[in-house]
Image (cartoon, helix red, strand yellow):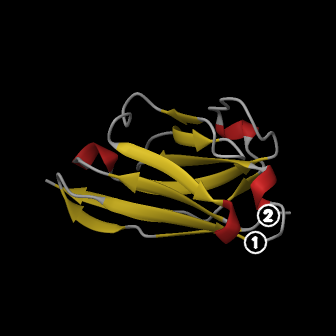
Amino acid sequence: QVQLVESGGGLVQAGGSLRLSCTASGRTFSSYAMGWFRQAPGKVREFVARITSSGGSTYYASSVKGRFTISRDNAKNTVYLQMNSLNPEDTAVYYCAADQLPFGSALSPAQYEFWGQGTQATVSS
């Protein structure tokens, strides 16, 4: 069992940056691949980024590639999402998720077993 807690959301102007964090409980964090998803009002939850258990591979949605960076610190049981050049279309609740399959490019929410409660990121124009 893994419990995930996100933080770092907030209100930022277009062009600004936010850094989201997701801290996991338990001693097996380093065995999970981690993902970030987001859900805007009235829309389905969508994939944002993924990092394998070792941190050796990362994957991004085309809409955020070049602007967002996913990273992890296994010693701190934490995964990060650095979001730069934000625009109003990035406004959403951001969720982190853990996948027991430590490698590969799982892009579907159904492939992740554990979820955090989400953190709101709002980008004003």
Residue at 29%, 50% (x, y): give it. Answer: 84
**Is label 1 in a helix, a strand or a loop?**
loop
Please state the horizontal and vertical placement of residue 101, each as a whole percent of the image: 81, 39
Residue at 74%, 35% (x, y): give it. Answer: 103
Identify residue for label 2: 2
Quadrant housing residue 51? top right
Identify residue for label 1: 25
Q: Against 121, is 86 above or below?
A: above
Mark 2 neighbour class, 10 Å CA radius: few under 14, some 14 to 19, many 20 or more: some
Whether residue 32 is visible, yes or no, is yes
Quadrant housing residue 72? bottom right
Please state the horizontal and vertical placement of residue 113, each as a whole percent of the image: 78, 49
Image marks 2 and 1: residues in contact by CB distance under 8 Å = yes
Residue at 23%, 64% (x, y): give it. Answer: 12
Between the residue at mark 2 and the residue at mark 1, the CA separation in whole angstroms equals 6 Å
In-image side of 31 versus 109 (left or right): right
The quadrant in which the N terminus is found is bottom right
Residue at 76%, 56% (x, y): give it. Answer: 30
Task: Kindly identify the amino acid type of the residue bearing the numbered disc 2.
Answer: Val
Q: Nearer the viewer, residue 109 or 73?
A: 73
**Is label 2 in a helix, a strand or a loop?**
loop
Q: Against 12, is 42 above or below?
A: above
